[in-house]
Amino acid sequence: MLDIAGIASEWEALLLDLWELNPGLRALFTVSPVRHWKDGAHVNQLSKATLLLAIHELQSRYPERIAYFPAYEIVMDELRDYRFYAGDMLHPSPLAVEYVWERFCAGFLTTESQDILREWGVIRKAIAHRPFRPESKAYQDFIMQTLLKAELLSRKFPYFDLSGEIERLRSEIK
């Protein structure tokens, strides 16, 4: 385990190199809420605390360039109930992951980005669907509707590349 100064120093060197290449770059740090029990609960907490203090040090040096997302704190403080943990009691459950993701999106993504994700989620789910009868009219109509949604999203946000998905959907049309 590195100490606080060691972690901050390693990251600062990397960030300075990155800022030289891209002066407008902002960094977002977080600490994983996954419990690392290999060395025991106490060492897990020490490790998390060390990371948090190193991030705090970096933020104090570069407050306009470094932000922190509290994934660890959300899981530990807001989602304390064991239903928010997977069966191994170390990893967050899918419900906890979804909750943390929603908090992240609300805090760090633009409204436009959230709109893209919402629309893309519907399309992605449709693309993942595996039919019993791919040749049926109902499935072909479903594919056509999904293709239409993908093409509309692609036109609405041209920088969001859906060309591979659109081509795949077109290939499924009989």
Image (cartoon, grey):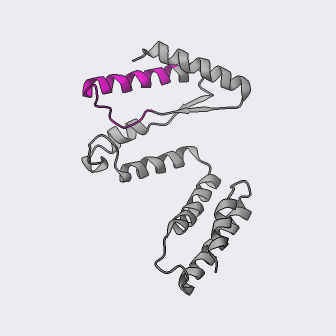
Q: Is residue 71 above or below residue 42?
A: below
Which residue is drawn at the image coordinates 36% and 23% (left, top)?
A: 47
Q: Nearer the viewer, residue 158 or 24?
A: 158
The residue depicted at 67 percent of the width and 66 percent of the height is 166
Residue sticking out furthest to the bottom:
137
- Residue 147 screen position, x and y as percent: 65, 72
Q: Say whether residue 144 is left or right of residue 86.
A: right
Whether residue 89 is situated above or below residue 125 in the rendered picture:
above
Answer with left or right where residue 40 lies relative to residue 102.
Answer: left
In the image, taking residue 3 as reference, residue 42 lies left or right, namely left
Could you say which quadrant of the image residue 162 lies in? bottom right
Residue at (47, 48) in percent of width and height: 101
Quadrant location, the N terminus: top left
> How many labels sit on residues?
0
Q: Which percent across, then down, holds residue 94?
A: 37, 52
Q: Position of residue 132 (x, y in %)?
A: 46, 78
| Highlighted range, magenta | 31-57
In the displayed structure, 114 sits above or below 165; it is above
